[in-house]
């Protein structure tokens, strides 16, 4: 028995040594990748200690030897744009290949949901682009959501693979990143690689290397604590004790589910009228969190019913289930996606059809977001779904109630994707082994609650990312936040405007640029549909900042001002041909005296400068332009039609 165990152990050790000796590459190196052109390419891996390795590409054959631990590396001399190539890695007994390799320009594309948003989410708007996609020289590697709070990672946990733009794979391409890459490729004529590392609802801190917090004692303390997995587990596993017991919200059963309100012939009574679109809090249901069921009988023509039909239900806050004639045809679990569901043939019938929608909301206003599409579609025919429906409350959620005594309530939890460094460490750090052409960044929504901190965070992030990639001049292009939120027809304070100001200040760093997108937002959607122009405007900035093209790339940027009597005269950079895009007075322009009581202002453009005044302000001191969550008509631009960035002269910088 002893000898059999000894033999088994010997075989296990031998197989382990063999496994360790296998010729291998990190997971970041894979088929179809795009490698940065015109820069040395550092390729490395593992082999048997002291094993001789030959790396071949084209007519080049590079030789190296693994060190005592089996590590080997070569530096492939800079290659011009082109391909495809095959890279052969040959050891003593094994050979590996990297196939379909292109050399071109590689960009790290990071941020939150507006960078995430892919063609599959916007397939109606970009149907033509999806259908015609056929570009093997625009490729994306989509990094899955991962976090690591302990340290920056040197590799991915598994191979992912690069995909090129074709009708199937483009559905997972970031729309912003794709149109950025498409415009750069059009201008430069080289392959474009997009490293898409983005996660919805995440703050800038999570995308910043640790060196970016060197001067921030509070966040550095958080980072160090989070490296201790025992500490993180203790926080996340903690439960209230003693008098601090907290009572979770009581969640009753849903009567609509219990009584099957979605079935034709259901006899439940007391349904009341309600309009779609609209929020139920605005239609008589005060402060209701829970579920509300909507129903309506819709007359469907015979020709319509015989086709495959698509339901367009705009956006719904928060979750929903959709039933047609008792059959569930779609469900969405959170508020942000557009609601589009297919109704298969055979579900609809000519004549009256029962449509039932269950909407569940957990906080704030629930219901159907206004100014979104609500209709049925079959080929070129449509049936409008807006108007009067009938509702009934299925469930009412009670609010959270802390338990008795001091300190009631659940303890905080550490959500990894919101922690400083966590997303950078896992999703971006592995690619620091690559040389890249630049970084594009679309984020800010999750930091809009603390906009004054953002400028320093952004500048430190840029510096830290440049350090991590070994290039202090690495180009960094950001999308300034578009408009989002209710229109305000009086001058007012705005957290989103303040955050845009922080972005504009950070964009003044060397080799940094910003795309103004103030006109591309939607007041009722934090994920505006027009992602194409965001990518194109980022590319315009890139063509100037990265490639040195002699083109206008920025709209007017506030430079300085002087006060002359009852007027304030504003000077701008990038203001050649200063004008308004619609020929009207400059919109969203406010002026104030020392008291900072802003009123709407008059203006005229003379000599490339903006002259601002108001008969209500005799001694003006401050001006603000487009200073709102969603400006009403931000129309100031230069002769190239590029819009001005929102600004104020009373900056607290």
Image: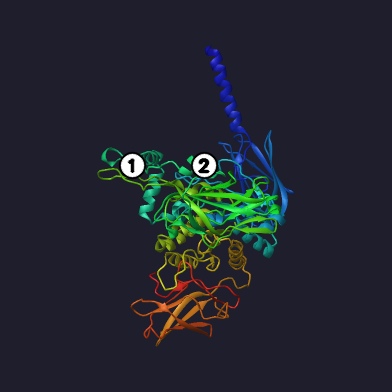
Q: Nearer the viewer, residue 557 or 6?
A: 557
459 over 403 or under it: above or below:
below
Label at residue 260:
2
Please rate how many residues cluster around mark 2, counting C-alpha atoms within 10 Å: few if below 14, some from 14 to 19, many from 20: some
Image coordinates of residue 622 in percent, x first then y, are 40, 78
> Where residue 627 sits in the image (x, y, percent)?
45, 71
Task: Find residue 350 and report its horizontal and vertical position in percent.
Answer: 67, 50
- In this rendering, would 141 be left or right of 87? left
| Dot 2: element | loop
Q: From this view, report whether residue 611 is shown above or below residue 372.
A: below
In this rendered view, identify the residue nearer to me: 479 or 44. 479
Which part of the image, by quadrant, shows the C terminus?
bottom left
The residue singled out by tag 1 in the image is: 247
Residue farthest along the bottom direction in this orientation: 565
Q: Is residue 444 left or right of residue 158?
A: left
Locate residue 288, reporting x and y percent: 41, 52
Mark 1 nearby-residue class (10 Å; few <14, some 14–19, many ≥20): some
Above/below status of 571 relative to 84: below
């Amino acid at each position: 028995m002893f000898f059999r165990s000894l033999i088994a152990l010997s075989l296990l050790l031998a197989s382990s040594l063999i496994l360790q000796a296998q010729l291998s590459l990190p997971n970041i190196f894979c088929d179809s990748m795009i490698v940065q052109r015109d820069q040395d390419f550092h390729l490395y891996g593992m082999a048997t200690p002291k094993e001789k390795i030959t790396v071949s590409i084209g007519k080049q054959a590079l030789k190296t030897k693994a060190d005592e631990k089996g590590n080997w590396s070569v530096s492939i001399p800079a290659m011009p744009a082109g391909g495809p190539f095959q890279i052969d890695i040959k050891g003593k007994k094994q050979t590996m290949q990297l196939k379909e390799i292109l050399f071109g320009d590689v960009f790290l594309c990071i941020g939150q949901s507006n960078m995430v948003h892919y063609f599959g989410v916007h397939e109606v708007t970009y149907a033509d682009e999806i259908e015609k996609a056929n570009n093997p020289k625009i490729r994306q590697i989509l990094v899955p959501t991962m976090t690591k709070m302990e340290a920056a990672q040197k590799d991915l946990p598994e191979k992912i693979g690069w995909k090129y733009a074709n009708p199937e794979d483009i559905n997972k391409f970031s729309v912003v990143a794709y149109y950025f890459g498409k415009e750069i490729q059009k201008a430069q004529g080289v392959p474009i690689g997009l490293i898409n590392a983005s996660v919805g609802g995440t703050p800038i801190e999570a995308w910043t290397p640790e060196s970016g917090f060197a001067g921030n004692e509070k966040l550095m303390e958080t980072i160090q604590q989070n490296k201790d997995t025992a500490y993180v587990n203790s926080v996340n596993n903690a439960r209230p004790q003693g008098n601090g017991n907290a009572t979770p919200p009581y969640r009753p059963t849903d009567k609509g589910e219990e009584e099957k309100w979605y079935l034709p012939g259901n006899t439940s009574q007391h349904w009341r009228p309600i309009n779609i679109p609209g929020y139920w809090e605005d239609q008589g249901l005060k402060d209701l969190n829970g579920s509300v069921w909507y129903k309506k009988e819709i007359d469907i023509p015979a020709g319509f019913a015989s086709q495959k039909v698509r339901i367009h239900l705009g956006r719904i806050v928060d979750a929903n289930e959709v039933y047609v004639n008792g059959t569930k045809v779609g469900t969405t679990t959170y508020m942000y996606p557009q609601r589009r569901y297919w109704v298969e043939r055979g579900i609809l019938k000519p004549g009256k059809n029962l449509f039932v929608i269950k909407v569940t909301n957990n906080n704030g206003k629930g219901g159907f977001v206004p100014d979104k599409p609500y209709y049925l579609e079959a080929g070129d025919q449509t049936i409008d779904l807006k108007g009067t429906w009938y509702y009934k409350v299925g469930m009412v959620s009670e609010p959270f109630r802390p338990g008795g005594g001091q300190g009631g309530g659940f303890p905080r939890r550490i959500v990894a994707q919101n922690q400083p460094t966590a997303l950078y460490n896992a999703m971006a750090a592995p690619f620091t082994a690559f040389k890249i052409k630049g970084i594009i960044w679309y984020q800010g929504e999750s930091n809009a609650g603390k906009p004054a901190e953002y400028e320093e965070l952004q500048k430190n992030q840029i510096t830290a990312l440049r350090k991590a990639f070994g290039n202090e001049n690495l180009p960094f292009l950001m999308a300034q936040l578009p408009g989002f939120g209710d229109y305000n027809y009086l001058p007012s304070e705005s957290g989103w405007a303040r955050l845009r100001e922080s972005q504009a200040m950070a964009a003044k760093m060397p080799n940094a640029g910003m795309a103004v997108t103030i006109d591309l937002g939607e007041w009722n959607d934090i994920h505006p549909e027009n992602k194409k122009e965001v990518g194109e405007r980022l590319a315009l900035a890139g063509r100037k900042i990265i490639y040195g093209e002699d083109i206008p790339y920025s709209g007017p940027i506030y430079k300085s001002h002087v006060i002359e009597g009852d007027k304030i005269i504003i000077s701008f950079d990038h203001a050649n041909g200063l004008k308004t895009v619609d020929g009207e007075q400059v919109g969203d322009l406010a002026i104030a005296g020392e008291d900072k009581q802003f009123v709407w202002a008059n203006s005229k453009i003379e000599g490339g400068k903006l002259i601002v005044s108001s008969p209500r302000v005799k001694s003006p001191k401050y001006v603000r332009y487009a200073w709102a969550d969603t400006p009403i008509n931000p129309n100031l631009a230069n002769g190239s039609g590029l819009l001005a960035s929102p600004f104020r002269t009373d900056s607290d910088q």
